Image (cartoon, rainbow, N blue to C red):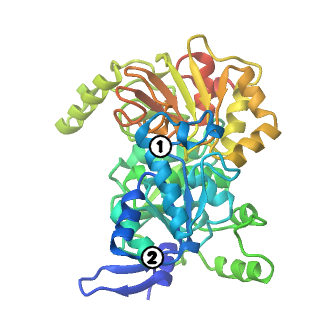
């Protein structure tokens, strides 16, 4: 019998039952909750008179709707009525059901996919779900983590299980040594650019190879975060010494003898040598230049020294039409050097790139320099802990001196659900995960890139090659 993949092992360990029609019921170790996808779920519980099955296996965080200024004023001072209502509903629901909660402004608050690992709530081998597609972030620790819908949020709250069909296995091996100016964000964009946003549909991706071994945990979280943009159900990296070093001593991990037992369990979490994968891809990172998107999908990506592609060169009529539509929305002409495109805004933040490593990378580029005239640039830490760490290192002062706004934690300009959003026609260099039409605000135009690239762009006033600033 063939060996098992990492995904197979975690699936089998959490399989509670299989229904007559072949659907699996999986046990959920950790349920992360936010204010956007939970109100209807809690309302359903209340209407049915049900309790939360395992409140101690839940963690609630206010992040999507939170403003990144004036959080000490409280939720009641949020101008947008819908945002205020969702945040108030979350606070009331978690209080009623006894769920741990990190409210806006709390010492441990931030973006849920930043806070969970920081607190040591994310462990290798876990099943983790959240009503947010970028839950795949937690796969960096060797966990099976993915987003779920609102009806599924209610099901997990009531039963601590999830009904699901098993995905296929895909392995992506990153080999070679990453060139200067590239990292986890470029790995993710390289993969998506190669296979497209549907290339991994129906699969769970396991990332491996020497380039993954060399990535920090922050870089691995960035890569797993964007796995969903390739169409995959989840992404994961087998735990190793870097994983253990990150987790050791954090408040949520086992202590004493329980830590030793956990290490023994985690040491078995890898794909067997004879495990079979349905798809395998190899990417040589030594051939990757810093990448940036030009269109309205993460697959619309080119090297920073490239030019906007020409749809007339395509024979596929559907793809040509998509490209023409994207260029029209983005206001770009084929053949334009990507580095000649001016921007109005620069956003460094989101659950993709708002950890301390990301802020260090941005600060290293802008130290002693200044944001170009007419550019509004902002840095939004992923959590209060990241914010404190950056301020302890003086990074906030470096960024402020360079002309950046230093904000409080939250999802911010990743999505247009809080005050941080683009105006129609504004062009933004963004470290977030999606460049869809209107994602950062109605009519806004988004170019995805790494934090270092975004920082260089802020200084130049146009999309810039970070290698010129290293």
In this image, 230 relative to 94: left or right?
left
Estimate how packed mark 1 is, as few (under 14), some (14 to 19) or many (20 or more) residues with alpha carbons within 10 Å: some
Quadrant holding the N terminus = bottom left
Give residue 84's mark. Answer: 1
Residue 233 image offset from top left, x and y in percent: 40, 62
Figure quadrant of the C terminus: top right
| Left or right placement of residue 208 versus residue 132 in this view | right
* Secondary element type, mark 1: helix
Residue 100, position as x, y percentages in the image: 60, 64
- Pick the front one: 315 or 188: 188
Closest to the observer, 434 or 319: 434
x, y percentage for residue 130?
Answer: 47, 61
Question: Residue at coordinates 72% horizontally, 48% vertically from top-left?
Answer: 385
The disc at residue 51 is: 2
Q: Secondary structure at mark 2?
A: loop
Question: In terms of sequence position, does the residue under pointer 1 or pointer 2 come before the other?
Answer: 2
């Amino acid at each position: 019998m063939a060996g098992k993949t990492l995904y197979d092992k975690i699936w089998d360990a959490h399989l509670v039952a299989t229904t007559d029609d072949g659907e699996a019921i999986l046990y959920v170790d950790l349920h992360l909750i936010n204010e956007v996808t939970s109100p209807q779920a809690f309302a359903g519980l209340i209407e049915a008179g049900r309790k939360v099955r395992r409140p101690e296996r839940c963690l609630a965080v206010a992040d999507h709707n939170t403003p990144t200024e004036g959080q000490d004023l409280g939720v009641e001072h949020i101008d947008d009525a819908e945002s205020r209502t969702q945040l108030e509903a979350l606070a009331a629901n978690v209080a009623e059901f006894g769920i741990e909660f990190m409210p806006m402004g709390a010492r441990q608050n931030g973006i849920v996919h930043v806070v969970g690992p920081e607190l040591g709530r994310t462990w290798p081998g876990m099943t983790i779900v959240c009503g947010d597609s970028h839950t795949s972030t937690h796969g960096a620790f060797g966990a099976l983590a993915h987003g779920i819908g609102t009806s599924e949020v209610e099901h997990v709250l009531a039963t601590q299980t999830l009904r699901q069909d098993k995905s296929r296995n895909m392995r992506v091996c990153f080999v070679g040594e990453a060139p200067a100016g590239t990292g986890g964000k470029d790995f993710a964009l390289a993969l998506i650019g190669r296979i497209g946003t549907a290339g991994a549909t129906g699969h769970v991706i396991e990332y491996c190879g020497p380039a993954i071994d060399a990535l920090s945990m922050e870089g691995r979280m960035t890569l797993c975060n964007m796995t969903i943009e390739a169409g995959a159900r989840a992404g994961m990296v087998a735990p190793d010494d870097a994983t253990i070093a990150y987790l050791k001593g954090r408040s949520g991990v086992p202590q004493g003898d329980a830590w030793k037992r956990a290490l023994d369990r985690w040491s078995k979490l890898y794909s067997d040598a004879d495990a079979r994968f349905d798809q395998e891809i190899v990417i040589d990172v030594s051939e990757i230049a810093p990448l940036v998107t030009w269109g309205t999908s993460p697959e619309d990506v080119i090297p920073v020294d490239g030019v906007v592609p020409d749809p007339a060169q395509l024979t596929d009529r559907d793809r040509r039409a998509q490209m023409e539509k994207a260029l029209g929305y983005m206001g770009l002409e084929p053949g334009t050097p990507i580095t000649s495109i001016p921007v109005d805004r620069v956003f460094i933040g989101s659950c993709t790139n708002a950890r301390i490593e990301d802020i260090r990378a941005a600060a290293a580029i802008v130290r002693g320099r200044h944001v170009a005239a007419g550019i509004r640039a902002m840095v939004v830490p992923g959590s209060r802990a990241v914010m404190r760490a950056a301020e302890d290192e003086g990074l906030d002062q470096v960024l402020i001196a360079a002309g950046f706004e230093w904000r409080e934690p939250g999802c911010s300009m990743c999505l247009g659900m809080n005050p941080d959003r683009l105006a129609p026609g504004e062009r933004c260099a963004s470290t977030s995960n999606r460049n869809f039409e209107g994602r950062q605000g109605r009519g806004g135009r988004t170019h995805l890139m790494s934090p270092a690239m975004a920082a260089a762009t802020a200084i130049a006033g146009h999309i810039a090659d970070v290698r010129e600033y290293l």
